[in-house]
Image: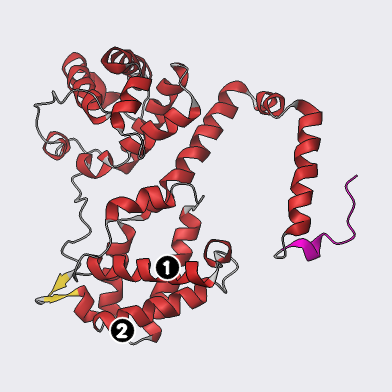
Amino acid sequence: NVEKGKDQMFKRLGGSEGITTLMDQFFNIGTTDVRIKEFLLKDKDRIKAGMTVYIVEMLGGPKAYKGKELGELHQNLGVNDYHFDAFLADFGRALLGAGHQDALIDEVMVSLEPVRADVLGRSRDVTDAAVMKDGKPLLERYGGDMNLETVVESMYDKLVEDPRVRFHFEKAKAKQRQIRRKMYQYLSGAFGGPVQYDVKQMRPAHYNMNITDYHFDVVAELFQRASKENGVEAEAMMDAAVVVAKVRADVTTGCVVRMELAKKKNAQDGMDQLFQRLGGLDGVMAMIDRLYECVERDKRINMFFEGAKLQ
C-alpha cells in the first residue's frame, strides 16, 4: 500500500462494490458482537451507509464522504480503545470471510489503525500540551539539542547492551549512526524543535521489524534512564513519555497485525492447516535443516549449538 498507493488496494478489494459487500459482512459480525453492537444497532441503516462511504474513500475509492468529522460523531458515545480494538477484530474477520489474501488484509488493517485517533478524539500530531510548559518547549526543558543528542547516544549505548532489545539495535557502525541520527531528529521535532523527521515514515520504516509492545516499553524505559542520568528534570521526563507514547502504534502495528491475523486464522482453520501449509512432516524437517544451517553461521548464537545433532 505504501509503495503502490491506496488506489491499488481499492482495486484488489473489488472496488466500491467489493467494499460494500465487505461492510455487509462486517455488520453481520459486528451487530452480534456484545462488545460493540450497541453502537451499530442504534440507527443501523444510517450508520452502515455512512461507514461504507467513509471506508470506501479511506481505502482508496472516490472521495464522496461529506459527513461530520469522526471525533464529533463519536465524542458523546463513550467509545474507547477497547471498542476500537473490537471493531478492528471484527473487520479482520470480515476480510478473512471474504477470502482476501493475508497480505491484503494486513494492508487494510494497517490503514484502519490511524482512524483510532480520530474516533477517540485524539490528535495525530505529536505536538501537544505536553510539549509546551510555562512558555518553554520540551526541547528546551531537556537542555536543548546538544543535551538531547547526548541522551539519545546514552540510550543507544544501553540498547545495544540490553538483551531484551539488542537484536534490533546491534547493527554495523554506519547503520547504528543512521538510527541514532533519526532517533534524535524525530525527538527534536516532537519536543518542539525544528521538524527534521517525517513522522509519516515511522510506520513503514518499522512495519517488518516485528517490534512488540514489550520492545517498545524497553526502549522507553532506557530513554527515561538516559534522560535522568543526563540531568533532565522529572516533569520533563514525564512529558517526554507522553509524546513518545503517541508513536507506539506506528512502531508496533506491523507485528501486532500479523500476530492477530495468524491467531485468527489458526483458530478458524485449526493448527493442522498450518502444518499442511508447511508441507507436512517433510516440509517441517526441511525447514529445520535450513534453520540449523543458518544457526551454525550466526556468530551471535552458534556457540550454543556446537556439537549438537538433530535427532
Q: Which residue was labeled with disc 2?
A: 147
Q: Position of residue 92 (x, y in %)?
A: 42, 28
Residue drawn at (52%, 40%), measured in percent from left and top? Answer: 259
Label 2 amino acid?
Answer: Asn
| Count of marks placed on residues | 2
Cα–Cα gap, marks 1 and 2: 18 Å
Main structural element of the magenta stretch: helix, strand or loop?
Answer: loop
Q: From which residue to which does the magenta span run? A: 301-311
* Residue 249 visible somewhere in the drawing: no
Q: Report the disc number at residue 178.
A: 1
Residue drawn at (27%, 57%), measured in percent from left and top? Answer: 198
Q: Is residue 97 magenta?
A: no
Label 1 crowd (10 A; few <14 / some 14-19 / many >=20): few
Label 1 amino acid?
Answer: Gln
- The mark lying in front, picked from 1 and 2, is 1
Residue drawn at (30%, 65%), measured in percent from left and top? Answer: 186
Q: Quadrant of residue 52?
A: top left
Residue drawn at (46%, 17%), measured in percent from left and top? Answer: 97
